[in-house]
Image: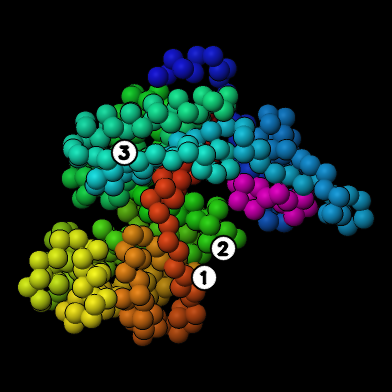
């Protein structure tokens, strides 16, 4: 596969300085912008912007268009700086316990193509073979664009060390200490960025979604697990050891059900899909096998199923209040496949949040956003773009 790149000259991104990455990221997420507005939003001087922009324009990553509408302070037409999305391509993959979702994106992280490959075997070797297959397919399609694919991002749930490129622990894949970045780089020939899936989704939300322009916000995902991505002072928090914002393991009931992490009554042990199914089976004796059945049962008015969902909503609301109390985000975006049941626990999430949020923390805006797995894969592509523009090539 790497041989397919032989025809392309080696290319690097002229990042060099933190100011250059800052300028590029600001234009990427908020552009097109006039240089004046760019300087203001990036918190840099006009001279610093000029210095950072020049090599980015020379190498074609940024372009400057004359905008007849915009005017400078002196009334002259102002030029708008924007990212040339077609300048480079990226791949993003989201691994779940039973499928790989893959996307090909441009430099502005717009999805050009999406693929889904089922996973029948969760062993690292088998997942790697499927990963290579999806990447090969997407690279073949990418050839038609005549632009080089500059990086691959892979998003995995669990404890992921992005710096080292290692999946420390992924409960769904049952992996421990898998050096995924290195392994995937060998089979694909691409630079690989591996990150926690919710953090990757948070990067995409920060740059292109509900977090644009916000310095402090959180993404909370509900579904097979309960995850959380945090942005504090404009940066996605990874934590000193790769773990941060694990609201899934905040204790809400010390006498509650046992969690796979070894503790009792974690948010995840009450509000994740498997926990809800277990609770319904225990209470009602009905052998529900998946969330579709559980949701149907609850919507038909089954008291036990409704109880399981309202308990889940309370746990999620308390978990979100914990985040609000600790970090005071402007907004919390609630997403994940669990949103399919949102009508069954929305009220409980909001009331438990309001009850547990302290003072002004309760003003935090709770927003729901259904983001399908392709969007999570897009988040993985966003991490690859992030690595490309911030790390020395
Ligand atoms: Zn736990």
Does the CB distance between marks 1 and 2 fall below 8 Å?
yes
Asked whether mark 1 lies closer than 8 Å to ligand 1, one says: no
Name the residue nearer the viewer: 315 or 290.
290
- Residue 320 at x, y = what percent? 37, 72
Q: Which residue is drawn at 36% across and 60% down?
A: 336
Residues at marks 2 and 3, CA–CA distance in whole angstroms: 35 Å
Give the SS element for disc 3.
Answer: strand
Mark 3 sits on what residue?
117
Q: Can residue 153 be seen in this view?
A: yes
Q: Where is residue 240 in the image (x, y as percent from the top left)?
A: 36, 51
Secondary-structure class at tag 2: loop
The magenta region covers 25-39
The reply to whether the magenta stretch includes residue 126 is no
Q: What element carries label 1?
A: loop
Residue 353 in sight from this viewpoint: no
Q: Main secondary structure of the magenta part?
A: helix
**Left or right of 161, for residue 234:** right
């Amino acid at each position: 596969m790497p041989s397919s790149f032989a025809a392309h000259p080696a290319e690097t991104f002229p990042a060099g300085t933190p100011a250059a990455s800052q300028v590029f990221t600001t234009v990427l997420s908020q552009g097109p912008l006039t240089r004046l507005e760019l300087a203001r939003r990036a918190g840099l001087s006009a001279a610093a912007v000029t210095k950072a922009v020049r090599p980015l324009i020379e190498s074609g990553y940024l372009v400057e268009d004359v905008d007849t509408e915009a005017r400078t302070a002196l009334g002259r037409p102002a030029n708008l700086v924007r990212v040339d999305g077609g300048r480079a391509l990226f791949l993003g993959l989201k691994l779940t316990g039973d499928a790989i979702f893959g996307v090909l994106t441009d430099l502005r992280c717009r999805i050009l193509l999406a693929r889904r490959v089922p996973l029948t075997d969760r062993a690292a070797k088998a997942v790697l073979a499927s990963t290579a297959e999806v990447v090969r397919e997407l690279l073949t399609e990418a050839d038609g664009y005549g632009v080089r694919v500059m990086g691959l991002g892979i998003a995995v749930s669990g404890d992921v060390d992005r710096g080292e490129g290692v999946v420390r622990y992924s409960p769904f894949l049952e992996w421990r200490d898998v050096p995924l970045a290195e392994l995937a780089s060998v089979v694909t020939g691409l630079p690989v960025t591996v990150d926690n899936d919710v953090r990757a989704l948070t990067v995409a939300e920060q740059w292109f979604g509900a977090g644009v322009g916000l310095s402090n916000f959180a993404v909370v995902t509900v579904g097979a697990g309960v995850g959380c991505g945090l942005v504090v002072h404009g940066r996605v928090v990874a934590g000193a050891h790769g773990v941060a914002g694990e609201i899934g393991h905040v204790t809400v009931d010390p006498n509650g059900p046992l969690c796979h992490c070894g503790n009792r009554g974690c948010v995840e042990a009450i509000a994740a899909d498997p926990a809800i199914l277990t609770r319904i089976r225990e209470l009602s004796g009905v052998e529900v096998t998946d969330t579709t059945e559980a949701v149907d049962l609850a919507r038909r008015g089954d008291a036990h199923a409704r109880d399981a969902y309202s308990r889940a909503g309370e746990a999620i609301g308390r978990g979100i209040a914990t985040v609000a109390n600790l970090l005071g985000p402007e907004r919390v975006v609630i997403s994940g496949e669990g949103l399919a049941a949102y009508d069954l626990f929305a009220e409980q999430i909001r009331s438990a949040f309001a009850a547990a949020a302290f003072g002004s923390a309760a003003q935090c805006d709770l927003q729901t956003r259904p983001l399908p797995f392709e969007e999570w894969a897009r988040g993985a592509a966003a991490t690859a773009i992030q690595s490309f523009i911030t790390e020395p090539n």
